[in-house]
Image (spheres, rainbow, N blue to C red):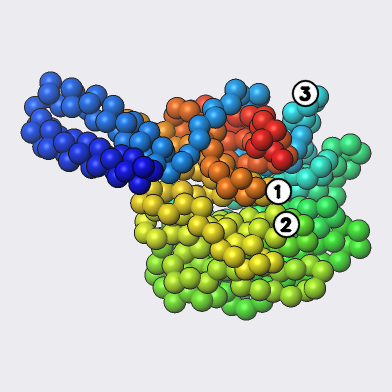
Amino acid sequence: MARRIVLIALVVVLVIVIGNNVIGRIYSMIPVQRAIFNNIQRITFNIQRSILESVKGIKKQVLPIAAEFPGREAALSSPYIAVQNYLHGNDTLELSVYNLETGEEYTVPTIGKHISGFDIEGKNVVWADLRSETRNPVQTEPSGKFTYNQSKLNWDIFLYNLETREKKQLTYNPAAQRNPRIWQHYVVWEDNRHDTTDDYYGIWNVYLYDLKSGKETRITRGEYDHTHPRIRDGKIVWRDNRNNTNIRFRGCENCPDYNWDIYFYDISTGKEQAVATGPTMECDPDVSGDLVVWAEYKELNNADIVMKNLESGKVTRLTDDSFHQWQPRVDNGRVVWTDERRGHSTSDVSTDFANADVLLYHTRTGKTTRLTGGWIQSQPLISGQYAAFLYDTQANPRYQVVKLPDKLVR
């Protein structure tokens, strides 16, 4: 019976697609009919997506927005959320932290309008800024190009405690240290102090800093890129291009032919291990417990979400279709990601089919739940009983927070 329902659903989708294309060819050149066709196309598009969700067994639980904050980037550590936003009336960047349970608000003492990555755990916030840089990072040449390569500027890492209001500088090297992440008393970042090339993007390595001992440890080596580190539960994961041979794709963040891989480092043992080394791009990793998740690109703007259990070695594909799923994050057996099967995530082009969603997969139940409704929600975060995502309107982007029900927490 189940197979018959799935077959019927797929046939309906096929009929809608064919009919849609035929009608479109007939009326696309006639203005009035074209407007009518566009409305029909939107309706059939939504029907197709609803049928596909049913076939995939995706549940829908659109939750009320518990809070929202202006900004385009955020970090979440329940009950705190850190949000980066430009102050109204000038170009100064502000990093604010909100307690989702008490409503308290904190301002992190960053300097200037440039931040290159930030994170929060508990009451500790880390970020990178340019207060140590003596050059003007936005000075431009007559050609309109930046005089200084952003990756060659003197980014440094700082830590601020919300309770004690103590600020501490963690790096003093004149090269770039950026994109920090924090877990307990450890901070990781990407660092180009060993880059001797003239390459625009540079060579990056992962560094680890112990807040208790003050010891700094170089985690990766070699003339390769090791970037976007994340840390949790004594493990560091990052994307790594040591196996890449397609140099011409360098700088393309979503070109599948650029062979990024995923590696991890165990702090307790000091050992490194490959997680994913497929022939195409694996990127945007995250880790929690023994679970590592990442986006695996099959073609341009078509990635799937993959999960690996480090203890058992089992690999699970959480999505496997022709739609774009990316930006995965994992917390205690729950995985969230941006999903474009109901619409794209770009708000600066045609908005007719702009309707990306945030989906949540729970390893305990094996079920996937859609958390969002209309428009574009992306860049999801999850921690404890809270999930957050960017509601992207270009002119007024904001991070929205939902409180998850018990069945999606335990």
Identify which amino acid the numbered label 1 is placed on: Asn
Query: Which residue was labeled with disc 3?
Result: 103
Q: Can you give x and y, in whole percent of width and height, for residue 408 in the image? A: 65, 37
Cβ atoms at labels 1 and 3 below 8 Å apart: no
| Number of numbered discs on residues | 3
Label 3: which secondary element: loop
Residue 81 quadrant: top right
Cβ atoms at labels 2 and 1 below 8 Å apart: yes
Query: Which residue was labeled with disc 2?
Result: 289
Per the model, the C-alpha gap separating discs 2 and 3 is 30 Å
Which numbered disc, 2 or 3, marks the residue that appears first in the sequence? 3
Q: Can you give x and y, in whole percent of width and height, for residue 310 in the image? A: 66, 65
> What residue is rendered at 44% in x and 29% in y?
375
Q: Nearer the viewer, mark 1 or mark 3?
A: 1
With respect to residue 371, does 327 lie above or below?
below
Label 1: which secondary element: loop
> What residue is rendered at 80% in x and 73% in y?
269
Identify which amino acid the numbered label 3 is placed on: Gly
Q: Quadrant of the N terminus?
A: top left
With respect to residue 384, does 209 lie above or below?
below
Per the model, the C-alpha gap separating discs 1 and 3 is 25 Å
- Is 40 left, or right, of 305 in this rendering? left
Identify which amino acid the numbered label 2 is placed on: Gly
- Is 224 left, or right, of 67 in this rendering? left
Per the model, the C-alpha gap separating discs 2 and 1 is 7 Å
Q: Can you give x and y, in whole percent of width and height, for residue 206 in the image? A: 68, 66
Which numbered disc, 1 or 3, marks the residue that appears first in the sequence? 3
Q: Residues within 10 Å of mark 3 (few under 14, many from 20)?
A: few
> What residue is rendered at 31% in x and 36% in y?
48
